[in-house]
Image (cartoon, rainbow, N blue to C red):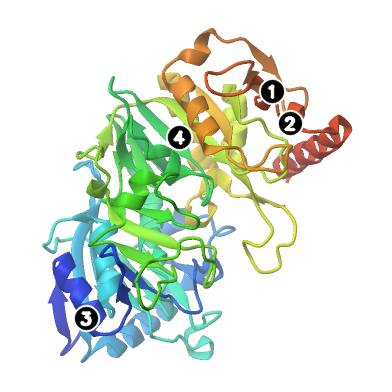
Amino acid sequence: MIANARIHANRPAAALAQAAVERREGVLTVSGAFAALTGERTGRSPKDKFTVREPGLAEQVDWANNQPMESAAFDRLRDRTLAYLQNRELFTFDGYAGADPAHEIPVRIVAEKAWHALFARCLFRRSGTAAANGWTVLHACDFRCDPAIDGTKSPVCVALSFSQRLVLVLGTHYAGEIKKSIFTVLNGLLPQAGVFPMHCSANIGAAGDTALFFGLSGTGKTTLSADPNRRLIGDDEHGWSDDGVFNFEGGCYAKTIKLSATGEPQIWNALRFGCVLENVPVDAETHVPDFNSQQYTENTRGAYPIDHIPNCEPTGRGGHPKNIFFLTYDAFGVLPPLSRLSPIQAMQQFLLGYTAKVAGTETGVTEPTPEFSTCFAKPFLPLPPKRYGEMLRAKLERHRVPVWLVNTGMNGTGSRIKLAHTRALLSAALDGSLATVPFTTDPVFGFETPTSCPDVPSDLLTAKATWSDPAAYDAAARRLAMLFRERFAG
């Protein structure tokens, strides 16, 4: 496919890290993790993502939520990419996505940077051999698209062709595009096989009880699923089949801003040799990473193999879930820290996918801004949202799973809800402690909230009680409820 390239295929982590250092792609930190900077793009580029309009699965694509690219344009861009990669030193990784053998897909990553191959080695499940009928990701991070020639919107492009089983990731060093492109592929393929693809983390208790944690970036999927008392199935992407839940990935991709050994010890200890840090400043003399710094971006990241978490579930699989948690960062401080949802409310919140951006996290954001991402995964959904919603509805009805809404954001004091309190609430829901606790109905949102919980002050369980001005709470709650209604009406 690529002529005269010098290809380093399926190199071990040590060889990839050494090559990345020798090629000056980044530096090793004091813990042994490799640290790289991604330059201009420090996050995903959703406005530069395209799906090829072609016969087959693409005929089912929700074009209101996916930018189309014509087949001829994709073919030209593919050929230009292949020509660019000729005569270069390249690094390839062969693995697969999907811990259930009945639903796995082979994946080959072709990268011009050694550290991107190391990232792929962390995030995908490893096979080490190419497989027929697999997907290929061509990651040419220094290739610059020409909008006048390629029909793109910028020098960056992420383009998926379902018929060719090919992804082009061009012009961006941000490694998250590699993993999320394959997640998009699975969101298109798995519903055809009756598997519900989910943007969620998952863990499993000693009694074999699986729990799911849905949420957008920054709401706590990785942090809350990394529970020392439960085995981690995966931190971000899963499928729910007739046999249970399975992880798509072989690693984790955690936000590291303000990471500490005391606050998130499992993630802290996982970021060692064989891992990748993205956009984390590193001291030039001591090589100590500064996880508190936003010098390059608030969206600092760490990628690590899941077996760096000591109590991971090695099979990547679990049974049908016994509890489901929807995580939201409510920057307005009006949602309770934990609510029990009715089946109708669960479907509404799933289709809303509500969270909020806070001031300072993005350029131009100066006050809390609501964000809605259908199914908690809007940027990665090729098919219409109702397709995924119907799959969730059927699963909830069949397995009678309780669904909880968890606010990991702010309360009325102006402070973020303490992680210890969130963990205590989750533990009480998981071990059944809340089954005997009285609940009250929130008068604005209609959610049921517990009146007590071990290790959580009772005055924190009701959002209004945390506000010094009850009238101000009422006004803020009505505004958010109105946004919910407007979103549904739209």
Point out the tag, 1 or 3, that comes first from the N-terminus: 3
Q: How far apart, in angstroms, are the residues tagged by discs 2 and 1?
A: 7 Å
Would you call the spot at circle 2 few (<14 residues within 10 Å), some (14-19), or many (20 or more)?
Answer: some
Q: Which mark is residue 198?
A: none
Q: Which mark is residue 391?
A: 4
Residue plotted at (25% across, 85% down)? 23
Residue plotted at (27% across, 58% down)? 272
Point out the tag, 2 or 1, that comes first from the N-terminus: 1
Point out the tag, 2 or 4, that comes first from the N-terminus: 4
* For the residues bearing labels 2 and 1, Cβ distance under 8 angstroms: yes
Q: Position of residue 179 (x, y in %)?
A: 36, 60
Residue plotted at (68% across, 34% down)? 335
Q: Which residue is mark 1?
A: 459
Q: Which residue is mark 2?
A: 466
Q: How far apart, in angstroms, are the residues tagged by discs 2 and 3?
A: 56 Å
Left-right relation of 56 to 91: right
- Determine the secondary structure under disc 2: helix
Q: Position of residue 142 (x, y in %)?
A: 38, 85
- Determine the secondary structure under disc 3: strand
As shown in the figure, which amino acid type bears the numbered disc 3? Leu
Q: Which residue is mark 3?
A: 90
Q: Is residue 353 above or below residue 405?
A: below
